[in-house]
Image (cartoon, grey):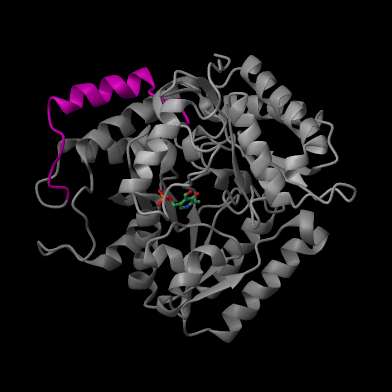
Amino acid sequence: MLPTILTNIPGLRSKQLAKRLSQVESPGITYLAEDFPVFWDKALNANIWDIDGNCYLDFNSAFGVAGIGHSNPEVVEAINKQASQLIHGMGDVHPPHLKVEFLENLLSLLPESLNSAILSCNGSDACESALKTAQVYTQKAGIIAFSYGYHGLGYGALDLTHKPHFRKPFEERLTEFTFHAPYPNTYHQGEEAAQISLNEVNKLIQKHKNLIGSIIIEPIQGRGGVIVPPIGFLKALREICDQNNLLLILDEIYTGFGRTGSMFAFEYENIIPDLICLGKTIGGGLPLSICIGRSEIMQAWGLSNGESVHTSTFLGNPLACAAGIAVIENLKQNNWPQKNSQTGLYLLEKLKQLQSPFIGEIRGRGLMLGIELVQNIQTKIPFTNLANYVLTESLKKGLILLSSGTHGQVLSLSPPFVITESEIDFAVETLQMVLNSANSDTKLK
Ligand SMILES: Cc1ncc(COP(=O)(O)O)c(C=O)c1O
């Protein structure tokens, strides 16, 4: 459905809520400004309605979560049914039966060798499960991660996450066990990008031989700015891991479940990771994440003696598992990976028709696309201001976008899989209008 904007954005009720929120929430959490945010009231498919009755198009799937659409009817039915049956279980003590059914369904989507899982709630938790599993198995605490990678903000995951903005206040407490190599970025580093990165990875492995046991990477960087590594790069990493007895951990929390045009992004390179982290789309909107690995690796944890070394209260939550089963069924029934590949091409073609001196590069795969903005020499508008301008002006026209990248200079386009061609046309026309107006808007100078 195309957006309908009825009020100034944000509307009065959103503004009132922002004021109330500022009284009750820690100020470091929600960004509150004159023109931001709008408070959501309900959602369906790719549409969001705010508390003032305005209808928007969500071109970000709410952080990449609403893959199969907001309030997908099959997910809603599964949650409703489960809610009257069992809302909470004792995940690692007396588990809900849905934990077994969900995991069996989930593992059927993955290569046979990835057959043992640890459940959790957030993406950050899944990365921490991978981090701990790698250490337990390899007996080495060191890990290589990549520049501008994002793996979450729990202390373990934060150690892997690169952006100084997140690390700086906690630097003292972060460990000396994570080594960051450059993520290959052909837009900024040219054709040498992969080699620069691989050389650094090899150097780190040689230098810290007795320490490094694993490598973690996003197969396409999401929050880092929708960066697609050159073909062959992940395969080369796989080979380096094999040669040096390291585990390859893929963080597919963003890319997983069809987003990039295949069920998992690793399929493009025909490689299989040792551990994979999944989240976002799979919960259909409920918090659900998983770390999956080869059983031989998971066996390093040993048998639980009744007090698991690694667990949490909501592990295997039955509502989330019921939603997850419905999501998997929906992914299969609709063949979303293949459809996303086609819809992504349609979107990419449309984006390439955009005319603006602010566009540096348009890139991505499937329904995970990004537009890197550049500073225009004549206007000298800083690109962070420009990206923020695009977000707020698009919002006023009914288009919800997010930015990503080192300086927030990349517009992230990850719409729900259910997005239609007319909705895509609307989004691209809106972007064109907003980019045109950026040229002349004095607010930006
Ligand atoms: C690739 C990746 N890993 C991990 C995370 C962290 O997930 P969460 O915010 O659910 O902890 C994110 C979140 O955006 C992500 O994109």
Q: Position of residue 206 (x, y in %)?
A: 60, 83
Which residue is found at the position 83% from the left and 36% from the top?
356
The structure residue drawn at horizontal position 78% and vertical position 40%, both measured from the top left corner, is 442
Residue 219 percent location from the top left of the image = 58, 52
Q: Nearer the viewer, residue 271 or 401?
A: 401
Q: Is residue 418 above or below residue 354?
A: above
In the rendered image, residue 73 lying in the magenta stretch gets the answer: yes
Residue 142 in sight from this viewpoint: yes
- On the question of residue 246 being in view, the answer is no
In the image: residue 43, left or right of residue 359: left
x%, y% of residue 35? 56, 37
Residue under the image location 13 percent in, 24 percent down:
84
Q: Quadrant of residue 340?
A: top right
User: Which stretch appears magenta?
Assistant: 67-91
Residue at left offset 69%, top offset 48%: 385
Front one among 361 and 13: 13
- Taking the magenta stretch, the answer to whether it contains residue 15 is no
- Where residue 369 sits, quadrant-wise, is top right
Q: Quadrant of the N terminus?
A: top right
| Relative image position of residue 376 (x, y in whole percent) | 85, 48
